[in-house]
Image (cartoon, helix red, strand yellow):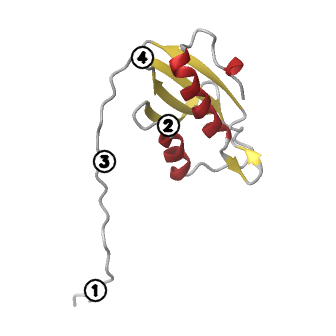
Amino acid sequence: MGSHEIPETVPNDDVILLENVLTAVKSLKTGSTPTCIKYKIDITPTGYLVHATLPSSSEHYEIHLEDLLFIQSVSPSRIDHVAIGRRPPNSTELVVRVLDFKQRISVTSSVAFSCATRKRKFQALT
């Protein structure tokens, strides 16, 4: 993968990051079949939107939470979000929002809750 896949107007400070994001996106597979079949990069006022087209609804593929977290792990402070969405008329996309080098980064934390369950026997009221 070379920088020719990235718009020529992207500053050098962002090229390597976008190449790494594209490498992560291209690494997603179901079996030996690549999940993302084509992509494009849109330039936004604060960065970039990477749109990776997913296979048609007639083809089998899976995207796991671990896949989305893997993409975000490329640069957690600069990858604003990773999502799966539908674009009319009927294509499904993996969308990665990347902040450009000029943006201030914000650090947030996530809290995860896990619940322990236990089985109970209920007695019928008579």
Please name the residue that numbered disc 1 is placed on: 122
Q: Earlier in the sequence, mark 2 or mark 4?
A: 4
Which residue is painted at 32% across and 75% down in the image? 117
Tell me the distance, in whole angstroms, between the alpha carbons under discs 1 and 3.
36 Å
Q: Earlier in the sequence, mark 1 or mark 3?
A: 3
Tell me the distance, in whole angstroms, between the alpha carbons under discs 2 and 1.
42 Å
Please name the residue that numbered disc 2 is placed on: 83
Tell me the distance, in whole angstroms, between the alpha carbons under discs 1 and 4.
56 Å
Quadrant assignment, res 46: top left
User: What amino acid is found at the position of numbered circle 3 in the picture?
Assistant: Ser
Q: Earlier in the sequence, mark 2 or mark 3?
A: 2
Quadrant assignment, res 124: bottom left
Give the mark toward the camera: 2 or 3: 3
**Res 46 label:** 4
Please name the residue that numbered disc 3 is placed on: 110
Tell me the distance, in whole angstroms, between the alpha carbons under discs 2 and 3.
17 Å
Front-lying residue, 104 or 56:
104
